[in-house]
Image (spheres, helix red, strand yellow):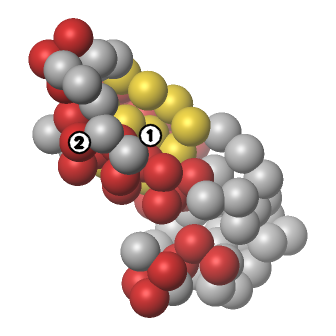
């Protein structure tokens, strides 16, 4: 995937989709092309070390607000509480 002129591309992009759809893969590729940081919503929503334990709402909201205030970013990957364990897009060999 390439963008003809990354300087005129999107500043902020949110990628949504079902678990295993490739959101993380796509966000990484777009981030590389646009030189934008990639923001993973899962990392803000869930406690470190496992999905299914939601982070404190105030802390989560603070983290999301800080990320959203950046000038540029590509974001994606929000897993439902029932989607525990590795997802296909978590496999580094698929990159």
67 to 9, vertically: above or below? below
Q: Residue at x 71, y 58 (%)?
A: 21
47 to 30, vertically: above or below? below
Q: Residue at x 85, y 70 (%)?
A: 82
Residue 6 shows in this picture: yes
Q: 49 or 84: which is nearer to us?
A: 84
Q: Quadrant of residue 31?
A: top left
Q: Residue at x 21, y 34 (%)?
A: 34
Neighbourhood count class around disc 2 (C-alpha, 10 Å): few under 14, some 14–19, many 20 upward: some
Q: Earlier in the sequence, mark 1 or mark 2?
A: 2
Where does label 2 land, which residue? 33
Where does label 1 land, which residue? 75
43 to 30, vertically: above or below? below
Q: Position of residue 36 (x, y in %)?
A: 21, 37
Disc 1 versus disc 2: distance between alpha carbons?
Answer: 14 Å
Q: Say what secondary structure mark 1 lies in.
A: strand
Q: Residue furthest right?
A: 82
Q: Position of residue 61 (x, y in %)?
A: 47, 34
Q: Position of residue 95 (x, y in %)?
A: 41, 74
């Amino acid at each position: 995937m390439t963008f003809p002129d990354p300087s005129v591309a999107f500043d902020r992009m949110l990628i949504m989709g079902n678990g295993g759809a490739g959101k993380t893969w796509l966000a990484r590729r777009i981030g590389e092309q646009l030189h934008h940081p990639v923001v993973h919503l899962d990392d803000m929503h869930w406690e470190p070390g496992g999905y299914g334990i939601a982070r404190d709402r105030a802390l989560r909201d603070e983290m999301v607000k800080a990320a959203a205030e950046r000038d540029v970013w590509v974001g994606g990957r929000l897993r439902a509480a029932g989607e525990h364990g590795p997802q296909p897009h978590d496999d580094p060999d698929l990159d």
